[in-house]
Amino acid sequence: MFILGIESTAHTFGVGVVEGPPLRVLSNARHTYVPPSGGMKPSDVAKHHVEVAPGIVREGLDRAGVSIGEIDAIAIALGPGLGPALRVGATVARALAYRYGKPLVPVNHGIGHIEIGKFTTGAKDPLVVYISGGNTMLVTLRDGRYRVFGETLDMSLGNMMDVFVREAGLSPPYILKGKHMIDICAEDHHRLIDLPYVVKGQDLSYSGLLTASLNALKKHKLSDVCASLREVAFDMLVEATERAISLTGKSDFLVVGGVAASGSLKEKYERMAESRGSKFHLVPQEFAGDNGAMIAMAGFHAYKSGVSIPISESRVRPLWRVDEVDILWKS
Ligand code: FE2
């Protein structure tokens, strides 16, 4: 069975193909929008996706060595995300489904991150740390749904880091040669400064840390503020993760999402896992950021479990949470 997955929830338009069983990723084509300055305007992101979509669909199929006629179902990320960006992916998916008579499989973007993480690491029933530009969540599968055991109370970790580097005049781009600008900026720091550290149970709050870090730029060296913000933000997340592991009794934890690619966070998690005797799984860098293969992967499991929708019910869902999705499969 071949499943084609389409991702367009935020800055990336991606198309991937998976085959199974046995499951394997055949292709993972994508193109990411980089704003010329400032933040991302949803209408500009949508315009980017419209421009690159035909080429990325073609590349995803060509690299997989599969024709559109051989595809069994089209998986589409219907949310959560930016409405105008989501609508581009949904329109492409509907057009392909209609033109070639293929079933349409709705996929939650967060479930895509989780499924590609489980597939690439082999993690079985882990606590999942889902960290990206839009989300910061600690979840685990229980009674057919991912239950949230901790999350940010205000902004996501990725968004906080992006806003800081932008306001500090370092970005865009936010990522350079695979490294976030905050890591590049922190490289030549000399000292750490005091910044607010807010963990409430398994929940986190990052907005005060952002404000204090921006204020600190008036009297401290930029690299010292970058390093301090990163230390505090990651330590908060590692503490919340450790609390959630303790609460849920899980022996394994899996870190997925765009922020999972940070080397500094990886080191902290390795130390924590060693001290607790937990098993740490990290999604490979190629699959950490948004991509089409992760949507195809979640779509594969959903379609095999009988999930598909008519085109008339494929509206986008910008606020669709991972804990609203029924998980009908074991992966
Ligand atoms: Fe994402």
Image (cartoon, grey):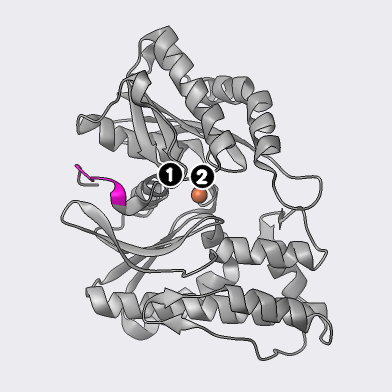
The residue tagged 2 is 81
The residue tagged 1 is 109
Amino acid marked by disc 2: Gly
Image spot of residue 308 (x, y percent): 28, 26
Image spot of residue 202 (x, y percent): 37, 77
Tell me the element at label 1: helix
Residue 188 within the magenta-colored segment of the rendering: no
Which residue is found at the position 68% from the left and 81% from the top? 212
- Numbered range of the magenta stretch: 324-329
Does residue 203 appear to the left or right of 233 in the view shown?
A: left
Which residue is found at the position 53% from the left and 55% from the top? 134
Label 1 Cα crowd, 10 Å radius (few <14 / some 14-19 / many 20+): many
Q: Mark on residue 200? A: none
Q: Are marks 1 and 2 in contact (CB under 8 Å)?
A: yes
Tell me the element at label 2: loop
Which residue is found at the position 55% from the left and 23% from the top? 57
Image quadrant in which the N terminus is located = top left
Residue 328 within the magenta-colored segment of the rendering: yes
